[in-house]
Amino acid sequence: MTHAATLALLGSPIRWRIVEVLASGPATAGEIADEIGSSFRIARESASKHLQLLARAGLIECERDMTTRLYRLSPRLIGALQALVDRLVALREPAGYDDLGTEASAGLEPAPHPDELDGDGCWCIRKAQELAPVSTRASPMYTLGGW
């Protein structure tokens, strides 16, 4: 899996919350669905799809018992995240960046409230919709504002 694919997969607040839940230890599918269902107001079926995506990518592992599925973080997840951070640091060092400074200068913003999430729980779509196309002859450009 590429760095971009790992980042895209973990970019969903719902899937990141699953990782956070599993970071504290193994959990059943039902426990995970209850946790993220209460946080993001999604159905168990949707939670199951997010678990399947993470499992297919090898970022979480699933152990099947007779009637339950027990999920845990895969060591591959930590390796994928470490590789991503190492890649970003490697790109940053030759550019001669100083310390990033404050969160505002680093471009960080607070996590969205669950009411701000779209149907898939992705606030990045909301951010993209804040960009308005500006027509130019050469190519379309985007600025902040309404459509």
Image (cartoon, rainbow, N blue to C red):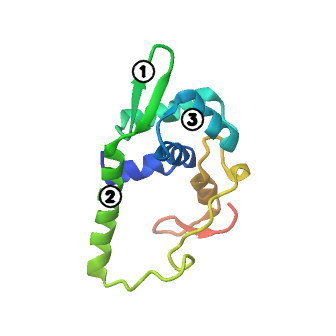
Q: Which residue is mark 2?
A: 82
Q: CA distance from mark 3 to mark 2?
A: 24 Å
Q: What secondary structure is found at the residue carrying circle 1? A: strand
Please state, as top left, top right, bottom left or bottom right, where the N terminus lies in the image: top left
Reply above or below: 19 against 127: above
Q: Nearer the viewer, mark 1 or mark 2?
A: 1
Which of pointers 1 and 2 lies earlier in the amino acid sequence?
A: 1
Q: Which residue is mark 1?
A: 64
Label at residue 32: 3
Q: Is residue 27 left or right of residue 130?
A: left
Please state, as top left, top right, bottom left or bottom right, where the C terminus lies in the image: bottom right
* Mark 1 residue crowding within 10 angstroms, few (<14) / some (14–19) / many (20+): few
Q: CA distance from mark 1 to mark 3?
A: 15 Å
Q: What secondary structure is found at the residue carrying circle 3? A: helix
Residue drawn at point x = 63 percent, y = 39 percent: 35
Q: Is residue 8 left or right of residue 88?
A: right
Q: Nearer the viewer, residue 5 or 68?
A: 68
Residue 142's image quarter? bottom right
Q: CA distance from mark 1 to mark 2?
A: 28 Å
Reply above or below: 62 against 143: above
